[in-house]
Amino acid sequence: MMTPTDRFLRASLILAALLASAALWWPAPAHAARIKELASVQGVRSNQLVGYGLVVGLDGTGDQNTQAPFATQSLLAMLQQMGVTVPPGQNMQLKNLATVLVTAQLPAFAQPGQTIDINVSSLANAKSLRGGTLIATPLKGADGQVYAMAQGNLIVGGAGASAAGSKVQINHLSAGRIPDGAIVERGVATPMNQGDSIQLDLNSSDYATAREVVRAINARMGTGTADAVDGRVIRVKMPESADARVSFMAEIQNLDVKPSTPAAKVVINARTGSVVMNQSVTLAACAVAHGSLSVTISTTPSVSQPGPLSRTGQTAVTEKADITITQQAGGLVQMAPGTKLADVVKALNSLGATPQDLLAILQAMKTAGALMAELEVI
């Protein structure tokens, strides 16, 4: 006969076993994302900068003047600004000079005096930028205004050597990077402190996600703080002071939101044969037959000679071509309806098709109406 203590211990063990097994059959909670991963503030973004400059100090690996005459013109213009006049008609051989394009990203809220990283890429036919120094280069925005000045020693992640017609090269030598290579000279105004509201733009248009973002903000900051304009734009009322706005944005950007299930989509890269599909892709019942056809052409040379003691005719070489066509049998495979991504992958793998063959199969399934997803080819 079991005592009350024994019955309590037995019930506790059964409950513990049920809780342990629940992890195997109980559905996992949906992944929640923060608002900062789902949306961005309109106007708070980086800006592209670009400039044309010169890299000097190369070890004979610069531009060739005959094929890149603008390198000499750029040097003459720079020397003229420094008060150095070169007599006209001089044929300068500038092996240590390279013309480059300098690109950079001006981050939001960047202020004069701060530094940003820059990328330097060869513009002409320089063999290598390794060991070069970029001289002062103004970086301009889309409006033509100068926002930063770039200068510094290049870091090129590669190496190379050549001699007696042989060449060895590791990585790319015609582009480099200069960490903190540009100083910001002018900032870009942002709409954070303008007006009584800001606009949040979702990364992808989705009405359900926009509704959830509005609900999360209003539940935290009060009803009426946020309202959805459409499936992508959300208008949020802001406090008056700048300090309160910073605290407000820090608060709402870390709110957890459950994103909606995305629309079913299959992305195909026709160049590499890559196929990626999301969890919403489903497959209707269908039958697929897949086979391959190969054509092999082999050529055998043969010699044709004239007859003995013949005064006419010449020895000639002819070719005999053999053409073989091989067609593999394509079995008819029936695919049951799949409501999960795992079922779709299992059904497609049963065909034994290569990634390139899978492209044609998926396109045919979409045309037949068996693939319940949008097909995008990149």
Image (spheres, rainbow, N blue to C red):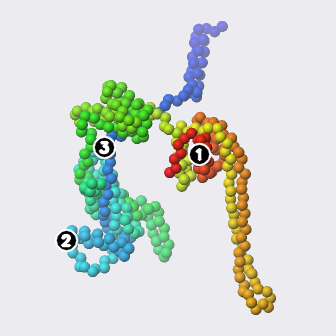
Q: Tell me, for residue 367, which label it has, or none.
A: 1
Please name the residue that numbered disc 2 is placed on.
83
Nearer mark to the viewer, of 3 and 2: 3
Residue drawn at (32%, 57%) of the image? 50
* Mark number displayed over residue 219: none
Q: Does residue 322 appear in this view? A: yes
Q: Nearer the viewer, residue 147 or 359?
A: 359
What's the residue type where badge 3 is placed? Gly
Which numbered marker is on residue 43? 3
Q: Is residue 177 left or right of residue 288?
A: left
Residue depicted at x 28% and y 63%: 135
Looking at the image, which residue is at 33% across and 25% down? 223
- Three-letter amino acid code at the position of disc 1: Thr
Direction right: furthest residue = 308
Residue 246 to residue 76: above or below: above
User: Given this view, does label 3 or label 1 mark the residue nearer the observer?
Assistant: 1
Circle 2 crowding by C-alpha within 10 Å: few under 14, some 14–19, many from 20: few
Whichever of labels 2 and 1 marks the residue nearer the N terminus, that label is 2
Q: Secondary structure at mark 1?
A: helix
